[in-house]
Every structure is written in C-alpha cells, then in structure tokens.
Amino acid sequence: MDSDAFEPLSNLGEERLRLIVEAAPSGMIMVDEIGRVVLVNSQIERMFGYSREELLGQSIDMLVPTAVRDKHPCHRAQFFADPKARAMGVGRDLYGQRKNGSELPVEIGLNPLMTNGERFVLASIVDITERKHSEAILQEKLLELQRSNEDLQQFAYVCSHDLQEPLRVISNYTQLLARRYSDQLDQDAKDFIEFTVDATKRMQELINDLLLYSRVDTKGKEFVSTDCNQTVAMAMANLKVAIDESGAQVHCAQLPAVEADGSQILQVFQNLIGNAIKFRSTDAPVVTISAEETSKSWTFAVKDNGQGFDMKYGDRIFVIFQRLHTKEMYPGSGIGLAVCKKIVERHGGAIWVESEPGKGTTFRFTMPKSSAQNKRVSL
C-alpha cells in the first residue's frame, strides 16, 4: 500500500481543514479506513436530510442506496489499496440515499488524507439532480428532432413522388386541351389554360426547391478537402450564359482549401454569384470573391456592385421563400439564400450580409478550418 499517496492532515492543519470543508459549496464528507464518518459539512446535511450528529461516527454505507450497499465496502477497500485523487464511478450513474429513503444522482470526487498514521478519504459530493433533469429534457428534444428529421425525409419523398405526378398530369392534359381544341376556344379560355400551365410549372419549381432544401442535411456527403478555387471555377462555368449575357466580371482572389461537402459549397458560391448577377444595377456586374483567415476559420466574401437593399431586410432574405421583389420582376422561388444558410450552418459556419441601396451587397460566410490546418496555425 502506498502511504505516500495520502497527504498528511497535519500539514493542512485540522482546524483549517474543517473551515475549508465547511465553506465548500459542494457536500464534503471525510471517512476513515473502516468507513466511519469523521467530518461532514452543512451541505451534506442539506443534501441527505441527516443532522451532523446523526452522521458522525456512523458508517458511510447509510448514504449508499440499499440496492448496492453490500458492494460498497469492496469499493472502499479498492480505493485504499490504490489511494489517489479520482472521480468515483467514472462511466456510470451514481446515486446517494437520503434519510427519507429517496435517491439523488450525485457526482463524487475522492481524495486521500493521512493524520497520525491513520488514513482517510475526503469525498466531495455534488447533487446533479438539476443537471440530470436538463439532460433528460435535452434527450427528449433530440428524440423530437430525430422524429422531425424522419418526418422531413418522408415529406421529401412525398414531394419527389406523390406530389409531382398529379402536377404533371394537370399540366400535360391542360396543354393537350390547348392543342386539340385551340380552334374551338376563345381568348379567355386560352388565357385560363396558360395561367393553369404556368401555375403548375411554378408549383413544380416550389416542390423541387423544397426538396433541395430538405436534402441539405439528409442527403449531404461526407466532408473532404475541397479546393475553393476549383469550386468557384465550376460555379462560373455553370453560370457562363448569365455571365456572358450580363457582361459580368468575376474576380476571384486566391482561396483556401476547406473540409467540406464539395457539391454543397459549389451551390453556395453559385447561388451568391448568381444573385449578384441577377440583382445588378444599370452597370455591368462586377463580382469579387475573397477569403480572410482567422485562427480557427476562413471568412469568405462575395461582393458586388449591384442594386443593394435596405439592411432592415437583412435577416428576412435568409428565410425560406422570402423575397424582396415580385416574381414578375425577378424569377425564382426565393429559396437560394435559405439553402446557402442551411449549407453553411451544416458546415459549422455562419452567413450574413452587408448592403446599402445603390451601393452593392457583400455576403460573408465562415468555414471552420480542418483539424490539420488548426494544428499548423497553433505551432
């Protein structure tokens, strides 16, 4: 047995130790080698419902739940066989038993002490009832979130199958009516058919956009090292027609590689560059893409010289289907920025906007560095 592991109580001063124990915010109880209680504080009295007089000289086992009480002497012997400061019951739930027989969840830290050749253990006991209650609520919320995600996946399946088919039928048969009976229809009827076909197309677009939004989390790929320079080049290639037609200039500074779902980050850059071109001013669009480094992340910026907008709408533009303009002015469902926000947050980042009417807009978003990059920075 290693007596050196026990701190001599005389070094602390017995009276000083009692004052420290009494002032401790957690429950403190000192027990000798055979399990008798020799010192307690008021927190123990409050926690377990016993008075100090009822505990002193009694076996510590009276505070151990009845169901496991017979095993406690063995645990105590194991501690004294290898005495060192430690947390008791690591990896399992611990409970104490109050005077009224009820149990309370606790955390216990053990510290060995020695005085006059006798060995003791000083235990710090914390009532974690509130924490357990909070953990139970959190677990329930996580289960609710899991169920919600399952419902979302089912909704996505319905969107991609059950809702699409009747829309296709409506659109196809409406157009068939127009082709077969066009010579028998007056202008009002033709207009009605055109409105119906247009509405079904817009409904299909909305469903597809909802499906895209719902799949950001459920269908996302694993994160791999992604060269953002190549990603922006792909986004520009996908937007070539819009860039050529608008005469846009897209300038891209040297960008880093990040741990990401490459297809989703491509979508972010494509949406932001596409927005800069779509909401341009009378001047040809000029889009500048850059990145700034911090110790733990990269902050990307997509800046344009477009129309800009009042910042009172700064939060609204990231909400699904929220638009600052009518669909007649600008096509689209208003889901693009909501998808960007969802993707960036999936990657552990944040996205925000800075804008002023007539002076352009800058979108910024953060991406955490990879663990390897963080190690290099910290050296």
Image: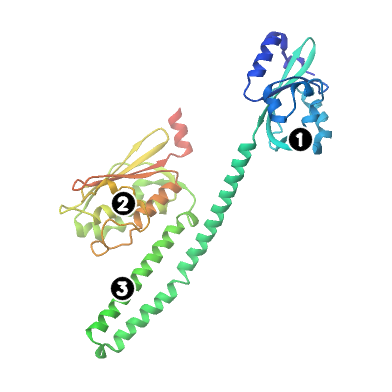
The answer for how far apart the CA atoms under marks 1 and 2 are is 64 Å
- Of badges 1 and 3, the one in the foreground is 1
Q: Residue at x 29, y 49 (%)?
A: 313
Query: Quick one: SS at disc 3?
Result: helix
Q: Where is residue 6? Give x, y as percent.
A: 73, 16
Residue at image coords 72%, 35%: 95
Which of pointers 2 and 3 indicates the residue nearer the eye? 3
Residue 16 in the figure: left or right of residue 182: right
What residue is drawn where x is 69% and y is 10%? 15
The extreme bottom residue here reads: 184
Tell me the amino acid under the disc marked 3.
Asp
Residue 131: give x, y in percent of width and height.
61, 37
Task: Give the residue type at disc 1.
Answer: Asn
Q: Which mark is residue 198?
A: 3
Upstream in the sequence, badge 1 or badge 3? 1
| Earlier-in-chain disc, 2 versus 3 | 3
Which color scheme does this rendered protein use?
rainbow
Residue to which mark 2 is pinned: 272
Of residues 243 and 116, the one drawn nearer to the viewer in this rendering:
116
For label 3, the crowd category at 10 Å Cα-Cα, with few meaning under 14, some 14 to 19 and many 20 or more, is few
